[in-house]
Image (cartoon, rainbow, N blue to C red):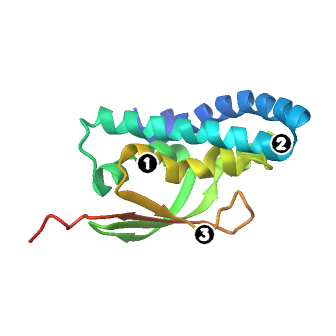
């Protein structure tokens, strides 16, 4: 089956289901404890989930992780045009790209979750790395979800050539 046509963005649908549940959790916590406390709880729950998912992905690959194995996972998040990206750099130590369209951000706004969309999705990107491979680091200064024209993903793999003498 063609990945682009027949399997339209299963990760987007997974995030939609999670967001439908977390929306009620967030609203309930917000009513009882205020917006800041509600955001903190949702952020921590999503953070833990992202780390766990990173560990599971690494384990599914036999625990052999690298920048290349991480890059090989990207179609899971971009399938079906969910993210439109412009690659800026690919090397043994760096994988950099800009997201110029983000259907995750569009979906969260449509769901009335623009206020916490960055917690539901954007924060996952860096914390996923913690579980997948601690040598993998993300630097990002802006996101579409928080009003920028594009998201700047700058992944670096620390120690990629450290074992060479």
Which quadrant of the view contains residue 95? bottom left
Q: Secondary structure at mark 2?
A: loop
User: In this rendering, would 17 be left or right of 11?
Assistant: right
Looking at the image, is mark 3 or mark 1 earlier in the sequence? 1
Residue tagged 1: 130
Q: Nearer the viewer, residue 71 or 133?
A: 133
User: In this rendering, would 118 be left or right of 65?
Assistant: right
Residue tagged 3: 141
Work out whether residue 124 can be spotted.
Answer: yes
User: Which marked residue is nearer to the observer: mark 3 or mark 1?
Assistant: 1
User: Which marked residue is nearer to the observer: mark 2 or mark 1?
Assistant: 1
Which residue is depicted at the point 46% across and 36% down? 53
Residue 123 x/y as whole percent: 60, 51
Which residue is depicted at the point 56% across and 66% down? 140
Looking at the image, is mark 3 or mark 2 earlier in the sequence? 2
Residue 7 x/y as whole percent: 49, 33
Work out whether residue 8 can be spotted.
Answer: no
Q: Secondary structure at mark 1?
A: helix
Q: Is residue 134 above or below residue 31?
A: below
Do residues under tags 3 and 1 come within 8 Å of each other at their CB atoms?
A: no
Q: Is residue 41 above or below residue 101?
A: above
Assign the N terminus to one quadrant of the image: top left
User: Which marked residue is nearer to the observer: mark 3 or mark 2?
Assistant: 3
Tell me how far mark 3 sits from mark 2, CA to CA: 24 Å
Residue tagged 2: 112
Pick out the residue farthest to the right.
Answer: 31
């Amino acid at each position: 089956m063609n990945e682009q046509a027949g399997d339209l963005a299963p990760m987007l649908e997974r995030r939609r289901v999670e967001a439908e549940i977390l929306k009620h959790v967030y609203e309930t916590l917000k009513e009882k404890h205020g917006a800041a406390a509600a955001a903190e709880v949702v952020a921590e729950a999503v953070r833990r989930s992202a780390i766990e998912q990173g560990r599971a992905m690494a384990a599914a690959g036999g625990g052999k992780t690298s920048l290349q194995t991480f890059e090989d996972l990207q179609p899971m998040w971009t399938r079906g045009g969910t993210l439109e990206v412009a690659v800026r750099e690919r090397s043994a130590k760096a994988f950099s790209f800009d997201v110029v369209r983000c259907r995750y951000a569009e979906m969260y706004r449509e769901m009335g979750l623009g206020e916490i969309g960055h917690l539901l999705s954007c924060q996952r990107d860096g914390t996923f790395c913690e579980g997948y491979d601690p040598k993998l680091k993300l630097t990002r200064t802006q996101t579409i979800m928080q009003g920028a024209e594009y998201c700047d993903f700058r992944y670096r793999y620390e120690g990629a050539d450290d074992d060479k003498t």
